[in-house]
Image: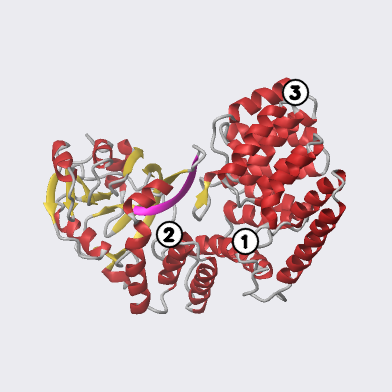
């Protein structure tokens, strides 16, 4: 995403005056893409004049499938460099213009515009920035759509080539002269390669990391190299390293006087997210507010709104969510998640209204959010919660039924689901769900505590003790409420001495948590 620092711009098309229609070559590099290569090539049938597939060592049926779709398949041993591979494909193309697709992409819209755009282009080296839509399938069955512009449709020219071993950039004369890039939002490429299962299938992280480390070693002051490595460490869960790399990418670009390219806008968002994950809130807030000035995106606004919510700054959170709603992703200058300007901020505004006690207003926000994302579990759960609180039990039950069977996005959502079941009087379902969660995730304090509270409210003190007894074994748990609830159940059972010990543990864990939060607890202390 965000390849290079040259900003794309909208430009009126000149009058078409070509002597003949321009010809178009599709170029694809592929290796072991049997599940997707046919779909890719099918999407351009009747659109381009030739299909060039450069195979870099497939061991499956990728070459055969490509030939079945009419492609000219040529082979090249994997050179360890994406730019080298793409340039080799360009060398084999014969069309006046080149459309470049990844094997896991399809031309989703704008096929009928390609020849018109080619004929209308100004003379000389020129590329059209087409709209890339990344479809990221989530475990709960929903799809996030992340979109940005990349120069994928360009006039074939001997000095327009790719550069960079990974996250390669399309450049004119290796960047010595700017390549004119014109946005073409009517042309849409959909990319399906960043779903969690796809990342695992291709082992992209393991493949990319050595190349990115090598790129950084070769260009230690290149902001884009730091950004790409930051994305990789973020994918590995090394949030601290990723945060530092994102921040360094931003600072290097500023020091070098570079324009704010797409990747720098993403660096602000990812940098703030990573800083928050490692508890560096003040740095996260400062970086986020800086980014909102120079590279505003709905994504960054939503992240900053979430930070404000965590700090109970409801007015601040509301302001950031409203700003996100007003940043139209179709015309946003930087990459953006479609949900960040539609259902996500509306969900946030509904949560704020709920916390303020205005349930009707919360429900109105949520209805708007559901129109954008009717199958989002987090929206359906909040809807069921609001409708239950408003006394509309039948509507709440119907909404809860829509959630049934979905993989919920994390423990907090599971607890909301159980709470709704309980408030609707479906106690056996609530108990069964909690019991299953505790069995599946025995180390999860939130599930264990909620089951204990559920049983405690029913007067099942002996069952509470059975659920919480494992917390007395091994290392102390991190939630003092587990021990406090155990103490309450033991007291009701008349076991005062054991209850006192449980309350003592609750106090010790609470004190330990406070010391950890202020950095005064020894890092190697196991208690």
Task: Give the image location of residue 383, x and y in percent.
Answer: 69, 32
Label 1 or label 2, whichever comes before in sequence order: 2
Q: Is residue 349 left or right of residue 84?
A: right
Q: CA distance from mark 1 to mark 2?
A: 18 Å
How many numbered tags mark residues here?
Answer: 3
Residue for badge 1:
292
Q: Residues within 10 Å of mark 2 (few under 14, many from 20)?
A: many
Please tell me in which quadrant of the rendered image residue 175 appears. bottom left
Residue for badge 2:
2
Secondary structure under the numbered disc 1 in the rendered image: helix
Report if residue 466 is visible in the image.
yes
Task: Give the image location of residue 425, x and y in percent.
Answer: 75, 26
Quick one: 377 or 439, which is closer to the camera? 439
Task: Give the image location of residue 189, x and y in percent.
Answer: 36, 44
Secondary structure under the numbered disc 3 in the rendered image: helix
Q: Nearer the viewer, mark 3 or mark 1?
A: 3
Q: Is residue 61 left or right of residue 385?
A: left
Residue for badge 3:
393
Which stretch appears magenta?
A: 143-151
Query: Residue 41, relative to residue 279: is it above or below?
Result: above
Residue 190 magenta:
no
């Amino acid at each position: 995403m965000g390849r290079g620092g040259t900003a794309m711009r909208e430009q009126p098309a000149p009058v078409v005056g070509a002597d003949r229609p321009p010809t178009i070559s599709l170029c694809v590099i592929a290796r072991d893409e049997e599940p997707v290569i046919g779909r890719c090539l099918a999407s351009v049938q009747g659109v381009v004049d030739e299909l060039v597939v450069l195979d870099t060592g497939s061991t499956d049926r990728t070459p055969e499938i490509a030939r079945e779709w009419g492609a000219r398949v040529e082979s090249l041993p994997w050179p360890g460099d994406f730019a080298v591979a793409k340039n080799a494909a360009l060398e084999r193309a014969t069309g006046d213009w080149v459309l470049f697709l990844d094997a896991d992409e399809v031309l989703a819209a704008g096929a009928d515009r390609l020849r018109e755009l080619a004929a209308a282009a100004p003379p000389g080296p020129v590329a059209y920035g087409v709209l890339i839509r990344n479809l990221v399938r989530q475990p709960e069955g929903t799809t996030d759509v992340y979109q940005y512009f990349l120069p994928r449709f360009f006039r074939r020219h001997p000095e327009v080539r790719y550069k960079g071993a990974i996250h390669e950039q399309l450049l004119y004369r290796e960047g010595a002269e700017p390549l004119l890039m014109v946005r073409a939002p009517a042309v849409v490429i959909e990319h399906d390669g960043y779903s969690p299962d796809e990342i695992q299938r291709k082992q992209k992280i393991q493949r990319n990391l050595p190349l990115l480390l090598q790129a950084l070693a070769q260009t230690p002051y290149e902001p884009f190299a730091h950004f790409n490595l930051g994305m990789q460490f973020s994918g590995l869960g090394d949030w601290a390293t990723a945060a530092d790399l994102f921040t360094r990418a931003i600072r290097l670009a500023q020091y070098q006087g570079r324009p704010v390219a797409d990747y720098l806008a993403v660096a602000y968002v990812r940098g703030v997210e990573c800083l928050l994950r490692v508890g560096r809130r003040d740095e996260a807030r400062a970086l986020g507010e800086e980014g909102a000035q120079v590279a505003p995106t709905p994504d960054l606004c939503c992240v900053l709104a979430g930070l404000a919510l965590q700090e109970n700054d409801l007015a601040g959170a509301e302001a950031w969510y409203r700003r996100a709603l007003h940043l139209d992703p179709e015309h946003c200058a930087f990459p953006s998640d479609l949900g960040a300007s539609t259902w996500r901020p509306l969900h946030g505004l509904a949560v704020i209204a709920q916390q303020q006690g205005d349930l009707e207003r919360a429900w109105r926000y949520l209805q708007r959010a559901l129109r954008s994302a009717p199958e989002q579990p987090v929206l359906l759960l909040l809807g069921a919660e609001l409708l239950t609180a408003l006394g509309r039990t039948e509507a709440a039950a119907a909404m809860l039924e829509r959630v049934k069977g979905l993989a919920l996005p994390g423990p907090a959502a599971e607890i909301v689901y159980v709470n709704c079941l309980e408030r609707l009087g479906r106690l056996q379902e609530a108990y069964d769900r909690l019991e299953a969660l505790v069995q599946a995730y025995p180390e999860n304090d939130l599930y264990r505590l909620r089951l204990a509270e559920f049983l405690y409210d029913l007067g099942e003190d002996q069952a509470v003790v059975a659920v919480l007894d494992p917390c007395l074994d091994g290392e102390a748990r991190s939630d003092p409420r587990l021990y406090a609830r155990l103490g309450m159940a033991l007291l009701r059972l008349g076991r005062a001495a054991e209850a006192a010990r449980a309350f003592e543990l609750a106090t010790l864990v609470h004190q330990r948590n406070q010391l950890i939060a202020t950095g005064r607890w020894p890092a190697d202390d196991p208690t």
